[in-house]
Image: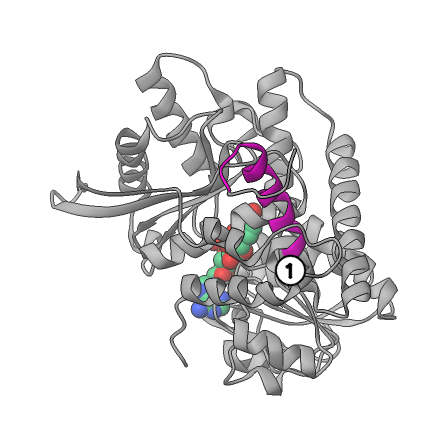
Amino acid sequence: MVKVNPFEDTLGRLKALAKYCKEEGVRFRPEDLDVLSSPKRTLIVNFPVKFKDGSVRIINGYRVQYNDARGPTKGGLRFHPQVDIDEVKALALWMALKTAVVDIPYGGAKGGITINPKETSAEDLEKVSREFIRQIHDFVGPDKDIPAPDVYTNPQVMAWMLDEFEKIKGVKAPGMITGKPLELGGSLGRDIATSLGGAYVLKEVADVYDIGMGASVAIQGFGNAGMNFAKIVSKWGYKVVAVSDSKGGVYDADGFDVAALVAAKEKTGSVVGIGKGRKVSNEELLLLDVDVLVPAALENQVTKENASKVRAKVVLELANGPVTHDADQVLHKNDVVVVPDILANAGGVTVSYFEWVQNLQGYYWSEEEVFARLEKKMVSAFREIHELVKRLDIDHRTAAYIIAINRIIDAEKKRGNLNQKESM
Ligand code: NAD
């Protein structure tokens, strides 16, 4: 597998936008893109934690606040053995673009800790989570920077972090973190928001590109994003024919009973435990002959090495960064519609925004209200992007990037952060 630096790859994407700067409706100039070429603030912390086996380990943690022109920064926290600064920078930049695509009043941030939660006890994870907040508490807050869950973090981790933050500050501040348990001010619907948002977008895509009910779907990754997506679309009549997790995957052209997959994952630790269908590797899953491919695990899955072999009609990026810049160009040439991460998985941050709004108001919404507002946001973002796709004859990622960067640059200009020739 080629090693791609996701941050450098995204900077390549930004540079490639310069050629659209003269098009009607594109409000930034090539030189304006410099403001997005590096993060506004980066915090790297290395701190000791005494584990329950008596050993003291130095833990590496990161928080990158990429751009805050449009509001407080927002983005998840990842616990994974491969977390490094380039991954966190790329994820933070994508968050800045994502919040702009769905037009919510935030900038973008991301954080992470280099740790393997699968080999760490809950007690030690709690210590690491609380100590991380002690390290970064001056850097985050409801009107500064608001973390949320990401890969291998969950509502319990958010609860420990909120509790530690509130103890340090001596106030209640539920809006400092989202994806919390309901008991601590979480929002109804946040648990499935990323997947439901992606499913609303898929419905729009299916209308435009004539993908009928019963269409086949392959999903890589069976965690919060992938599993909930499988549950939702199978209820809507799509056929989930392949799924995988870090231990491997399974394929059955007749489709799986998603409840049985969930039960197998719970019982055996992997979807492979369902004992039905043909075993496939994560690499094979990406190349199956399906209508819709949904990467919902990690970055750099479709690269220039395998892009020409992708047979899906639509790639819906529930994961962040699963398709590289080179691969995008191959897929576009082959008429594969890629629904970019900054739209496809923006349902998570959208409902995180709703959670924060509810926390600030101290007034909580019903699940129906949350879902109705989510659907409106996702559908209008898709339609706006699709209009630009048609008008400029470009792919959906390029259109989404143009719309997001228009909004970020407009805000930077109003703040007086960019050189301006034109009069007010
Ligand atoms: P999660 O921790 O709940 O699940 C991750 C899943 O990926 C697990 O099933 C794991 O087995 C699988 N996985 C790990 N390594 C893999 C590999 N090498 N090959 C195949 N599968 C592998 O994480 P999540 O929250 O579902 O996040 C998944 C993706 O969705 C990430 O890219 C994340 O950034 C993105 N995302 C999540 C949210 C959210 O709200 N949870 C929001 C936006 C984007």
Q: Identify the residue at horizontal 27%, vertical 39% (top origin).
A: 128
Does residue 154 appear in the picture of this structure? no
The residue at which mark 1 appears reads as 21
In the image: residue 56, left or right of residue 83: left
Q: What amino acid is at disc 1?
A: Cys
Spot occupied by residue 358 in the image (x, y as percentages of width and height): 63, 23
Q: Quadrant of the C terminus?
A: top right
Quadrant in the rendering for residue 71: top right
Q: Identify the residue at horizontal 56%, vertical 24% (top origin).
A: 185
Does residue 14 appear in the picture of this structure? yes
Q: Quadrant of the N terminus?
A: bottom left
Q: Mark 1: few, some, or many residues within 10 Å (few <14, many ≥20)? A: some
- 13 vs 238, nearest the viewer: 13
Using the image, determine if residue 44 lies above or below residue 265: above
- 33 vs 146, nearest the viewer: 33
Using the image, determine if residue 167 lies above or below residue 243: above
Spot occupied by residue 416 in the image (x, y as percentages of width and height): 52, 34
Q: Identify the residue at horizontal 75%, vertical 75% (top origin).
A: 291
- 20 vs 367, nearest the viewer: 20
Spot occupied by residue 314 in the image (x, y as percentages of width and height): 72, 71
* Secondary element at tag 1: loop
Colouring scheme, one of rainbow, by chain, secondary structure, one colour: one colour
Q: Identify the residue at horizontal 48%, vertical 67% (top origin).
A: 12
Spot occupied by residue 59 in the image (x, y as percentages of width and height): 22, 46
- 217 vs 331, nearest the viewer: 331
- In the image, which residues are magenta? 402-418
